[in-house]
Image (tube, rainbow, N blue to C red):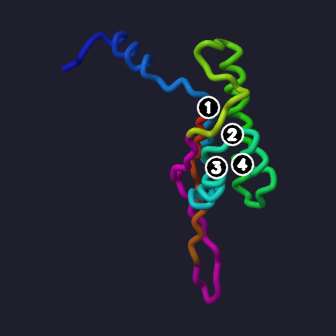
Amino acid sequence: MAKGHRSQIKRERNAQKDTRPSAKLSYARVSVQKACFVLDAIRGKDVETALGILTYNPRYASSIIKKLLESARANAEYLYSQDPTKYPNPEHLYIAECYANKGPTMKRIKPRAQGRAYRIEKRMSHITLVLDAR
């Protein structure tokens, strides 16, 4: 049935926990497809280069992802100040993982001619950025 005491299971799970600095934005009002266009442009780049790309990218998703990247960088600086031996130096960070998962969809109605109604789907996504040191 159970493989051990609850505290032992929690200890083992926390030992395997990912310690890389990251940031996650849930329920972003941008579709997964549109967010992935921007995420593909910054994947694997260092943080400063990625911020430059996002600053001059005209897409709406880039402004959302830029704020998220700045948050992830601030998280990295905070973690490094707490324990410099365990966490990577914020000077040498790059984007190790970035992805967008599908969120819920808001359904809206748009009135059309002759009593018809079209359905509008406003899609949301959950965007995740994970940083790591080179």
- What count of labels does the image hold? 4
Alpha carbons under labels 4 and 3: distance apart: 8 Å
Disc on res. 134: 1
Name above or below for residue 122 compared with residue 62: below
Q: Would residue 31 be found to the left or right of residue 61 on screen? A: left
| Dot 2 amino acid type | Asp
Q: Position of residue 72 (x, y in %)?
A: 67, 33
Circle nearer the viewer, 3 or 1: 1
Q: Residue at x 63, y 23 (%)?
A: 88
Residue type of the residue flagged with mark 3: Ala
What's the CA distance linking mark 2 and mark 3? 24 Å
Task: Give x and y (percent) for residue 107.
Answer: 56, 63
Query: Residue 108 or 50: which is nearer the viewer?
Result: 50
> In terms of image quadrants, where is residue 25?
top right
Q: Are marks 2 and 1 in contact (CB under 8 Å)?
A: yes
Q: Earlier in the sequence, mark 4 or mark 3?
A: 3
